[in-house]
Image (spheres, rainbow, N blue to C red):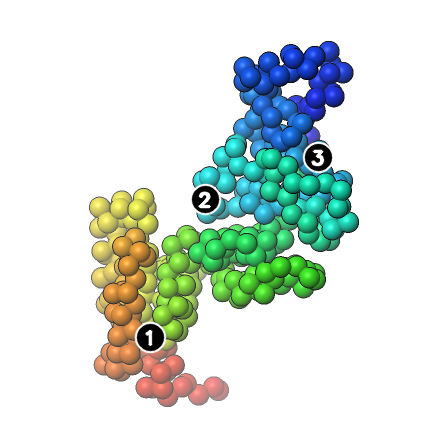
Amino acid sequence: MTQATWRDRRALGDEGLSKNQIDNAIRRGRLHQLTRGVLVPALCQEDLWQRCSAALSTQHPEAAVSRRTAAVARRFAWLPANWSCPDTDVCVDAPRSDLTRSARSGLDRRIAALPPEDVVLWRGLRVTNDARTGVDLARYEPRDLAVPVLDWLLTAQRCTREELVSVCDRMVRVPHVRRARRFIDLARPGVDSPRESHTRLHIIDADLPEPDVNLQIREEALLLAQGDLGYWRWLIWIDYDGRDVHELRRLYGQDQRKDRWLGRRGWEVFRLTNRDHHEPSMFLSQLRRAIADAPARIAALSSSRSPEVAAARIALGIDPRPQRS
């Protein structure tokens, strides 16, 4: 376990430093005050573990690092960069029985029920586990941040939907639990980027049918193509072009070849960019028309064109379902 370098003023006094020497060290930047009365050497002030250790030293023994700070400590993906800044307040949840301590500078302290099932040890420190942290973010953070994080938790198999719901079930008289449940209902495994989550939410907000996630065309064990979103029953394929990977793919023609390949198999392809995220109305209008036109378009395609066309024609009632032997 990492050795704590923080000290309070009494400990520094026991080590032989006078009050003036301590104040002088703070003014000269050799010591940094993480929170009231707790000091750490300047070289360690950016160490998250040291900051969390110092924060918990001021709290009840059953308190835990939580919310944004727990998400950073647990290495959640797709978090805002400023959550990792060393001058960001450490989020701490204190048990309801702890009414003796007030909030301190440098801490974002809240009173909350902390069942043992919701807490794990992180290098010896009490931290909310992945499911509880995800639920707490869903309780307090905006939907466009919380739902992608929940998508990532499910995709990375850091927790299950059942575990997220169980956390909510244990939250009695806790604010914003209904909000968290709504966001959990929107979360889907198989998502590779926050923009995929945002695109799905745009589609849902437009009262369009919820798209399928993580489309994969396979021949036995061979993966032929993978898409972000779409509709199997209407043969609509939606890919979101990230700035890094897809710029190279477009440069070498990989995306163009993929789109032509999908088109030959009967798919209508939507390739989205950041502009479609910030100004989604045109894309959503085109998608609405594509959904309305899909049955006629698929009816005009031969079943032999691809297995996907054959399946879509059956799903739409154009062809009879095969009889089971």
Q: Assign a secondary structure to mark 2.
A: loop
* In this rendering, position of residue 51 left or right of residue 147: right
**Pick the front one: 36 or 273:** 36
* In this rendering, position of residue 132 left or right of residue 255: right
Say few, some or many: other residues with alpha carbon within 10 Å of mark 1 (under 14 / 14 to 19 / 20 or more): many
Q: Earlier in the sequence, mark 3 or mark 1?
A: 3
Where does label 1 land, which residue? 234
- The numbered dot on residue 58 is 3
**Pick the front one: 151 or 254:** 151
Residue 286 falls in which quadrant of the image? Answer: bottom left
Image coordinates for residue 156, horizontal then vertical, percent:
52, 52
Q: Assign a secondary structure to mark 1.
A: loop
Q: Are marks 3 and 1 in contact (CB under 8 Å)?
A: no
Residue at 37% across / 67% down in the picture? 203
Q: Are marks 2 and 1 in contact (CB under 8 Å)?
A: no
Q: Amino acid at mark 2?
A: Pro
Image coordinates for residue 287, horizontal then vertical, percent:
29, 70
Q: CA distance from mark 3 to mark 1?
A: 58 Å
Image coordinates for residue 318, horizontal then vertical, percent:
32, 86
- The numbered dot on residue 80 is 2
Q: Assign a secondary structure to mark 3.
A: loop
Residue at 70% across / 21% down in the picture? 9
* In this rendering, position of residue 231 left or right of residue 252: right
Q: Amino acid at mark 3?
A: Thr
Q: Amino acid at mark 1?
A: Trp
Q: Earlier in the sequence, mark 2 or mark 1?
A: 2
Q: CA distance from mark 2 to mark 1?
A: 36 Å
Image coordinates for residue 102, horizontal then vertical, percent:
69, 41
